[in-house]
Image: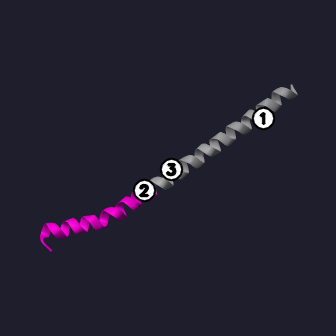
Amino acid sequence: MDLIVLVCVVLAGLAAGVLAAYGMCLGMFAAFRMHARQAAAESAAPSMVASTATATGN
């Protein structure tokens, strides 16, 4: 009986660790996605201004 309880506790701890790691991965991917969008917007902004200036003849 003690062996079954010990095995269940070990598996529950393993499952909790996997779920915690999964949550951290989701959070970090969301942060990276937000950073990538911000970096893309910043790098696209000067090129949009330059193409508008050449299109209007300035």
Which mark, residue 36?
A: 2
Give the alpha-carbon distance from disc 3 to disc 1, as whole Å: 30 Å
Which residue corresponds to mark 1? 9
Q: Badge 3, how many Cα within 10 Å: few under 14, some, many 20+?
A: few
Residue 12: name its quadrant: top right
Residue 49, position as x, y percentages in the image: 24, 68
42 to 15, vertically: above or below: below
Left or right: where 40 falls relative to 33: left
Q: Give how far apart the Cα atoms at labels 2 and 3 are.
A: 10 Å
Q: CA distance from mark 2 to mark 1?
A: 40 Å
Amino acid type of disc 2?
Answer: Ala
Q: Quadrant of the N terminus?
A: top right
**Residue nearest the viewer, comparing 5 with 22:** 22
Residue indicated by mark 3 = 29
Give the image quarter of residue 54: bottom left
Q: Check the image and report above or below for 35 versus 12.
A: below
Labels 3 and 1: the sequence-earlier one: 1
Q: Residue at x 59, y 46 (%)?
A: 23
* Residue 2 higher or lower than 42, as above or below: above
